[in-house]
Image (cartoon, rainbow, N blue to C red):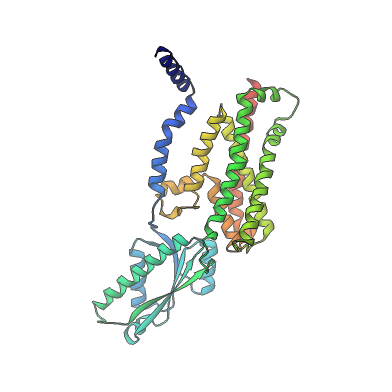
Amino acid sequence: MNQLLAIIRKELIHIYRDKISLFLMLSMPIVLIILFGFTISTEIPNAKISIYDQSEDVQSKRLIQSLTASGYFQVVNYPKSEKEIAEDFSQLQIKAAIIIPPQFEKKLISEKEVELQVINDMSDINVASVIKQYIETVILNFENDINLTEFGKIGQLKVSIQMKYNPELNSVYMFVPGIITLIMIIITALMSSITLARESETNTMKMMLITPVKKIHIVLGKVIPYMALSFLSTLIILAISVWIFDMPIKGNIFVLLILCIVFMFTSASFGLLISAISKTQLDAMMITMMGLFLPTVLLSGFLFPLDNMPYGFQLLANIFPAKWFILALKDIMIKGATFIDIWFYVAVLLFISTLLTIFSVTQIDRRRAS
């Protein structure tokens, strides 16, 4: 029994001395409950929409007021043509557009049926279905309200849905960009961080740093093989998605590959950062899973829409490169975006990777000096 207690005491001392592992183990349940509690939700408040009012009469304005007062929508623009609506989808990232027909009030009184057209962004089927339900609910309530007021019984308000970007409702449009992101994170960031942490744990990194080899060559030599594997895996996923699951690539394939390479550099820079603050391979793995893998799943818009999260979490998502990569990837593959359309996303990724790489190389200099 004394021997067992001695071993337990020794292990507890080891855990206590490994401050990073102890912190990660104690903080993990707190991080998980907060992330899952605030990110998993079916509600989408303040979804961005545009309203094209071709009537501009009293009842069309009342309908618009009902939409804005519902709390479901944020009207970001009132376009004057369907061409402007297309621009709103690409530039303002709206989720839906509502078109009110001409002579709306007159048709409400004289005709048995009035049709409202809704253009829905179906690139994310879950979000689109929720927004469709919101719009139908508001319109039904509006119809009931005017039936009880000055008009008496009127004709039915009919909603005609036009599905944009994914008319076939193919679910592969949702998970392919997310899988590409996760593969790059796992292979590039996780494996490179573990490899560099192993070099530090076994003290071989110090031996490499005292050799007449430039530190940037050491870093690149460790990271590039995993980037090559990640790029190969991405090509395989794209090929399978296109040839087997009919996933479209409407944009330029070379722009898509450039975007993937930029994101690989960004993932590698996170791997360098994690290895710089990790003492052991276990620390590197746990930090990658908690600090990068989980946020990639929960805070990138891959599984759960960012619009239904608290504002603080939406701001937090901007720190993680997966959000920007998935937005750009979907725009290229599904919407046919050009490099001009995604330049901001690429600039954010390059900024993050540059910042993290500089910090990580600085840490390598400190190890060389120690």
- Say which quarter of the image contains residue 225: top right
The quadrant in which the N terminus is found is top left
- Say which quarter of the image contains residue 252: bottom right
Q: Residue at x 56, y 34 (%)?
A: 274
Residue at the outermost right position = 212
Residue 320's spot in the image, x, y percent? Answer: 53, 45
Residue 65 visible from this viewpoint: no
Q: Residue at x 67, y 37 (%)?
A: 223
Position of 288 relative to 179 (above/below):
above
Q: Nearer the viewer, residue 173 or 335?
A: 173
Residue 359's spot in the image, x, y percent? Answer: 60, 34
Q: Residue at x 38, y 46 (%)?
A: 37
Residue 46's spot in the image, x, y percent? Answer: 40, 59
Q: Nearer the viewer, residue 242 or 6?
A: 6
Position of 299 relative to 80 (above/below):
above
Residue 36's spot in the image, x, y percent? Answer: 41, 45
